Amino acid sequence: MNDFKYDDIKSNLNRDQILDRMHDTLSDFRYTHCLRVEKVSRGLAAEFGGDVERAGLAGLLHDYAKERSDEEFIDVIKRKNLDPELLNYNNAIWHGIVGAEIIKDELGIYDEDVLNAIRRHTVGATTMTQVDKCVFVGDFIEPERDFPGIKTARAYAEKSLDSAVAYELKHSIQHLVEKNREIYPATFISYNYWITKGDL
């Protein structure tokens, strides 16, 4: 599981080079979180038949842009002609969807399986691959996560990815409602789809 082959996905860019770049741009807290999500995502992929390398690379990079400024995200949304609805939201949504564009530009990673998993790790999607699910769930249950419901989330992840995805979406929407936060519309679409697929 520790035999990383990310340079098979992006030639001339190995894991050590990616880690150097991340270390330069992320806080220690965020950097170590990404390492844990990489490990969990790879483990889930091995368990449930996903592409271990793509799940690992996407898990490693899922928060690559998390600590960028709002101004940078807004500039990318406008410059790349992304969905203008994104401008009504914030980093919680941007760092996945817009972050994938930053990863393309800065790291030259164009593998759509990897990029889609990064895009989808914040709000999910109705068309999630095994790689997408591994990163989505891996981010939610990594070992340092501690919140009401984490034991249930981990139990679902041992049972099935679909159930874990459904639980995470349900939990996230409940949390946002309790905090009186706006909810990105795609989150509801994901929830409506996956709640019928997972056995909760």
Image (cartoon, helix red, strand yellow):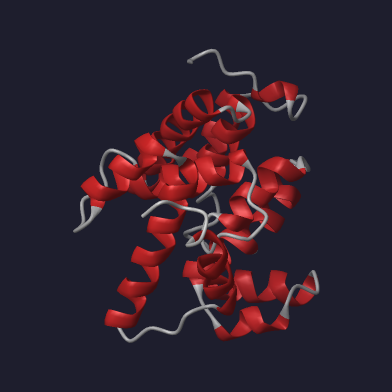
Residue placed most toward the observer, 108 or 158: 158
Residue placed most toward the observer, 129 or 92: 129
Where residue 75 appears, x then y in whole percent?
69, 74
Quadrant location of residue 120?
bottom right
- Residue 24 can be seen, yes or no: no
| Image side of residue 101 versus residue 158, left or right | right
Where residue 181 appears, x then y in whole percent?
38, 83
- The C terminus sits in image quarter: bottom left
On screen, residue 196 above or below 30: below
On screen, residue 2 above or below 200: above
> Which residue is pictured at 52% across the width and 38% down the height?
60
Where residue 86 appears, x then y in whole percent?
63, 78
On screen, residue 176 above or below 163: below
Residue placed most toward the observer, 47 or 97: 47
| Image side of residue 128 versus residue 199, left or right | right
> Which residue is pictured at 63% across the width and 28% down the height?
51
> Which residue is pictured at 44% across the width and 46% down the height?
137
